[in-house]
Amino acid sequence: MKKVSKWFAGSAAFATLAGTVATAAVPFTANAATKIKNPFPAAYHNSRSAISGGNLRYAEISDTPFVGQWVQALSQEATDSDVEAPAFESLFWTDSNFRIKRGGPANISFNNSNRTATITLRNNLRWSDGSQVTAKDVEYEYELVANPAYKSSRWTSSLSNIVGMDDYHTGKSRTISGITYPDGPNGKTLRIQFKEMKPGFNFSGNGYYLESAEPYNYLRNIQPGRLASDARTTTRPLTTGPFRVRRIVSGESISYERNPYYWGARPKLNSVTVTIVAPAKAVASMRSHQYDIYNGMTSDLYAQARKVKAYTTTGREALYFQALYFNLGHYDQRRSINVTDRKTPLSNPNVRKAMGYARNVSQVLKKYYSGLSVPANTTIPPVFDRYWDSSVNGYSQNQNLKRANSLLTKAGYRWNKNHTYRIDPSTKKTLSFVYLARSGQSNSEIVAQNYIQQWKKIGVRVRLYKGKLTDFNTWVQMTTDPSADQNWDFTDGAWQTSSEPSQMDLFSASAPFNFGHFTSKRLTTLLNNIDSQKALSASYRRNQFRKYQQYVYNSAFVIPTQYRIDWIPVNHRVKGYSAAYGNKGTTTGNGWNTIQLTSRRPASK
């Protein structure tokens, strides 16, 4: 599992709902506080004897091709994380609570008095071509993120906490002074000097240091502008996981073979084949028992998929939230900062709140999501139960047209003579917005039009961007590339979040992923407080998270929409599979090298 926030590429995201499953059996119900619990077992237990070797067939459900970017500094989509999983391995292992533990490819230790972290790589940690993974390979990832020439979306103010990172980022220095090599760049030890020690340091995904390496000698001669498209980062990567790439059909499939240089135990499987499967074809392929594991299944498919024989559904509470984002400014690439400067009625928080209250999110989730999603009240997923605040009201639990109308009237917008739409009395212009809604499922259009009708009830005219839904890959470009068309007002964004709850890398002033471009002194203060020295006190940090979630609600710079369950059907010939978070064992390797099969063909019953 990759430990950074990424766009959730699954079709269930971005308000692209599908299916007509109003009569589907709901596996659980959520309480009024929108707490969501996993109704499925985390692991599939198979008592049958395993065969030797075999090829596991893995289906990744997506309505668009995968990008296939292997450099973590340049990767931003959850689909890439999923399809690359057999060959990718994070530097650090974690337990089920995302706390970093010893025993993985590398260990990390902290010296609070010296404000340093020391990363020690395994002596037998090698790339898939047999070359050693070195301290320079770890440092190189920082160069890729911090050098603006590479246009990484991973640069945020969090990394400025490393001594010398700002100077390197701005071109004042050719090296990162706070990163050193105790036994040389070709050695196995890296030391990082911080300005402050942070409360999330012991947890993966904290954003203040990176958790992957890149093969420096393999990539060093590629010009920055060509790195993202070079074959060495797209179709011929070097990796450190149990498997390595044998063949890639761009955007469609990846064939893996055993990595003979893997540091851990030899994988039980001979090979793994990962294939992109469109949501519309997923259940049909299950009925023909075409694949062993189905990842990224959308909630609308559950009613049909649960009836297919020879599969057991595993699941977990997702590191996931969806929210309605408002386009309030722009990202200044030269200064690496978001600027809230767009002249739009959405600059008024009462207008944003009205847009949130007007949507019938709860009704949509009940009708189309098979009980696998619940309305969200904050941007902190409930999986972080120490920090998620159930007392925040939120906007999505109950539609409130009366409140929405009141807020628009308070904002100064009056109904026109025909009482069809609201107008700005000073300009006589209709209150009108462009909705960047995503495609992906059979009834995406129906649900988008449903929301447009709800907004019309409060007098707001909403049109789809260019009169139609937008595919995921185009959507990512429009929300992350400052040079792309910005003629949209709001959109639904969903995240496979980091495994540490701080949202500095999502909503800080310097975060490229803050694609609504909202900034404020109060937001900056709260994000800083959550990750401050004072937050080393657990009670202080919880209190700051509570204040942060209340601020998100009060300011409505985003409108949290839903939380969800990840559900993964597993064929009955699979042995040793678990969807649970965290690494098992100590020296054997990650979960991909322990999966086995009990027959040569997928089970049919």
Image: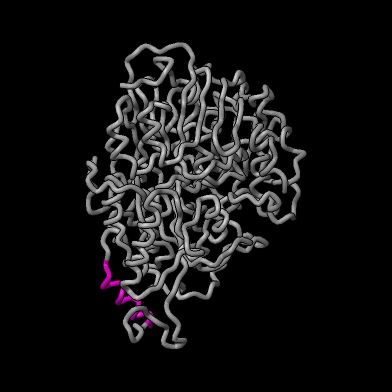
Image height of 444 relative to 569, above or below: below
The front one of 207 and 190 is: 207
Q: Nearer the viewer, residue 168 or 267?
A: 267
Residue at horizontal 55 percent and vertical 36 percent from the top: 252
Say left or right for 31 vs 596: left
Percent coordinates x, y for residue 603 in the rendering: 36, 20
Q: Position of residue 311 (x, y in %)?
A: 33, 27
Closer-to-camera residue (171/440): 440
Question: Residue at (49%, 58%) from the top-left corner?
Answer: 507
Main SS, magenta region, reads: helix
Q: Quadrant of the C terminus?
A: top left
- Quick check: 95 left or right of 137? left
Q: Which span of residues is magenta-colored?
A: 400-413
Is 354 located above or below residue 542 in the figure? Answer: below
Tell me if residue 387 comes above or below residue 524 in the rendering.
Answer: above
Q: Position of residue 315 (x, y in %)?
A: 34, 35
State the residue at coordinates (74%, 54%).
171
Q: How many marks?
A: 0
Task: Identify the residue at image location x=59%, y=41%.
Answer: 72
Quadrant in the picture for residue 310: top left
Decide if residue 136 is in sight here. no
Tell me residue 306's x, y (percent).
29, 34
320 is within the stretch colored magenta:
no
Left/right of residue 79 with respect to residue 305 in the rendered view: right
- Visible residue check, residue 325: yes
Asked if residue 405 lies in the magenta stretch, the reply is yes
Q: How is the image coloured?
A: one colour
| Relative vertical location of residue 412 with respect to residue 125 in this rendering, above or below | below
